[in-house]
Amino acid sequence: MIFSDQHMHSDFSGDSDAKMSDMINSAINKGLKTICFTDHYDPLFPCYTPEEDNIFDLDTKKYHENAVIIRNDESIQSKINVRIGMELGIYPKVYEMCKGIVKEYPYDFIILSSHTAGETDPYLPSYWEGINPIDGIKKYYEEILLNLQNFDDFDIYGHLDYCVRYTKTTKEQRSIDNYKEIFREIFRIIVDKNKGIEINSGGLRKGNLNEFNPSPEILSFYKECGGEIITFGSDAHNPDDIAYGINEACEVLKNIGFKYIAEFKERKASYIKI
């Protein structure tokens, strides 16, 4: 079984109103042994409207101060291991900024995520206008590859096929057969750098596909390419969604051949048999 949720958000993220205390209590009630807050920091994110400018910035000083309180609170830590990380949005324009952000405070876990390609979020219909869906998907994966070639200070890469979560594409268009050589290089770099990926259940409740991100097809290819480090993340933005799909994720991973789930503390992985 999996008793660790390594990807969740609180009201430190611009798209969540959840109090950390409510998230922690929900995780305890659901029987989890370990959780990690990974609040958003997407520096210079090209927001959807002018009013939303800086919505995905993170007050790292206040976040760190809160982390110290939680880490030192025995009344919490005696019930559940609560760790503090970050979901860092990456694209070429912000590489140097992100290097500084990661080193600013002692995080437990860094998820590197791509929420854009060509500085546009694939969540937006405008990303897909005038482009063949396969080319749009390929553009997103090619930017992930570029990010991996130029940025090292992370632990796992988040929701690798996020680009297809919110658009209408066919199974054939999404098939890894269209992108296998890109993924082969992506996974070669991830494995060589001793990094990992996640199985993210956000796609089961958001978007159009009702599928884990990345898909079981991509997860299987990761395993085939030598990938072993994998975390589970619900991508919860409210207490109800913590651990969403955790049992199904366990079955998917076991069927692919994964034997261990990873969790992180002080940027070091430990492995629990599933």
Image (cartoon, rainbow, N blue to C red):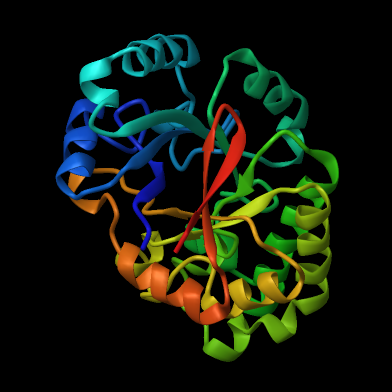
Would residue 140 appear left or right of 168 to someone viewing this image? right
Q: Where is the C terminus found, in terms of image quarters?
A: bottom left
Residue at 28% x, 59% y: name it. 244
Judging depth in this view, the residue of 228 and 124 nearest the camera is: 228
Number of disc labels: 0
Residue 23 in which image quadrant: top left
Residue at 75% x, 54% y: name it. 143
State the image coordinates of residue 151 (x, y, percent, origin top left): 78, 38
Q: Where is the N terminus found, in terms of image quarters?
A: bottom left
In the image, residue 93 sits, relative to residue 196, either above or below, namely above
State the image coordinates of residue 137 (x, y, percent, origin top left): 65, 70
Judging depth in this view, the residue of 119 and 29 nearest the camera is: 29
Q: Residue furthest bottom?
A: 172
Would residue 72 appear left or right of 78 to someone viewing this image? right
Residue at 47% x, 71% y: name it. 167
In the image, residue 249 sits, relative to residue 39, either above or below, namely below
State the image coordinates of residue 10 (x, y, percent, origin top left): 31, 32
State the image coordinates of residue 38 (x, y, percent, origin top left): 45, 35
Residue at 53% x, 77% y: name it. 216
